[in-house]
Image (cartoon, helix red, strand yellow):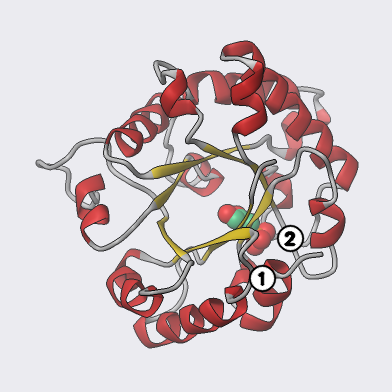
Amino acid sequence: MRRALLAGNWKMHLNIAEAVDLARGVVEAAAGCSDRDVMIAPPFTALSAVAQALQGSQVFLGAQNVAWEAKGAFTGEIAPPMLKDIGVRMAIIGHSERRHIFGEDDAMINRRLRAALEFGLTPVLCLGETLEEREGGKTMAVLEAQLRSGLQDVPTGQAEQTVLAYEPVWAIGTGKTATTEQAQEAHAFLRGLLASFYDKNLAETVRILYGGSVKPDNVDALMAQADIDGALVGGAALKIDSFKRIVRFQ
Ligand code: 13P
């Protein structure tokens, strides 16, 4: 049985005081939910302060990206040991905004993922097709190519610690959610790919989150799908009332 993971990606929002406030709310929202994991990924500037606010709680601290080297001349990047140093446990990698706005390619994403694993951070590898790709019937081919290159040279022991997040680009921040059937179909396809790249055991272990306009009113139906193991939430993670309802999905 896979443990549910409800994750908030705060993107480029909130100052330190606002982030600490929201983090405290998430700690309260997650209290007593011992059957599920909760993660929040604040902007880098708020990580230290949020780490303090999460101390003693079950809520995991996540980063929104991670460099592929431990140190060096990489202006603007944050190394995995630096994140570990302040208590980060997970790292979102290959988010569609990184791929499409900042031009991160599959090879770069694979390097980030392998570095995260090497330094003991749990990667959340994001995958998803654009509207054009979906309408052109290319969804599954895109997902297969992204998963294959994302996990290239990742051995079984590390791959089973990876979390996947299916985030159709056309559903992010648009209010358009994939239907539960579209999401389940993509998740089942990704799980099948994991079984063929590795083995059935690994495929049954790896958690696959859905992301893209997850809200209080659609989270229960999404989470009821056999292959949807959690949610990666943007907008609705920025308000405690909506994120609390998502954390407490039924
Ligand atoms: P929204 O929930 O705002 O659509 O964002 C999803 C997302 O990109 C999470 O990483």
Q: Label 1: state its secondary structure.
A: helix
- Is residue 228 left or right of 180 when viewed as pictured? left
- Is residue 77 left or right of 99 when viewed as pictured? left
Across and down, in percent, residue 81 comes to 20, 48
Residue shown at 50% from the left, 82% from the top: 22
Number of residues whose C-alpha sits closer than 10 Å to that of mark 2, classed few (under 14), some (14–19) or many (20 or more): many
Specify which label sits upstream in the sequence, 2 or 1: 2
| Disc 1 within 8 angstroms of ligand 1 (CB) | yes
Number of residues whose C-alpha sits closer than 10 Å to that of mark 1, classed few (under 14), some (14–19) or many (20 or more): many
| Distance (Cα) linking label 2 and label 1 | 7 Å
Across and down, in percent, residue 166 comes to 66, 40
Residue 239 visible in the current orientation: no
66 is higher (above) or lower (below) than 216? above
Q: Quadrant of ligand 1?
A: bottom right
Residue shown at 78% from the left, 70% from the top: 216
* Residue under numbered circle 1: 236
**For the residue marked with disc 2, what is the amino acid?**
Val
- Is residue 107 left or right of 217 when viewed as pictured? left
| Disc 2 within 8 angstroms of ligand 1 (CB) | yes
Across and down, in percent, residue 35 comes to 65, 59
Residue shown at 67% from the left, 76% from the top: 244
- Is residue 108 left or right of 168 when viewed as pictured? left
Q: Label 2: state its secondary structure.
A: loop
**For the residue marked with disc 1, what is the amino acid?**
Ala
Residue 238, located in which quarter of the rendered image? bottom right
Across and down, in percent, residue 94 comes to 48, 40
Residue shown at 29% from the left, 61% from the top: 87
Q: Are marks 2 and 1 in contact (CB under 8 Å)?
A: yes
Residue 214's label in the rendered image is 2
Instruction: Give 1 or 230, whichever is nearer the viewer.
Output: 1
Q: Quadrant of the N terminus?
A: top right
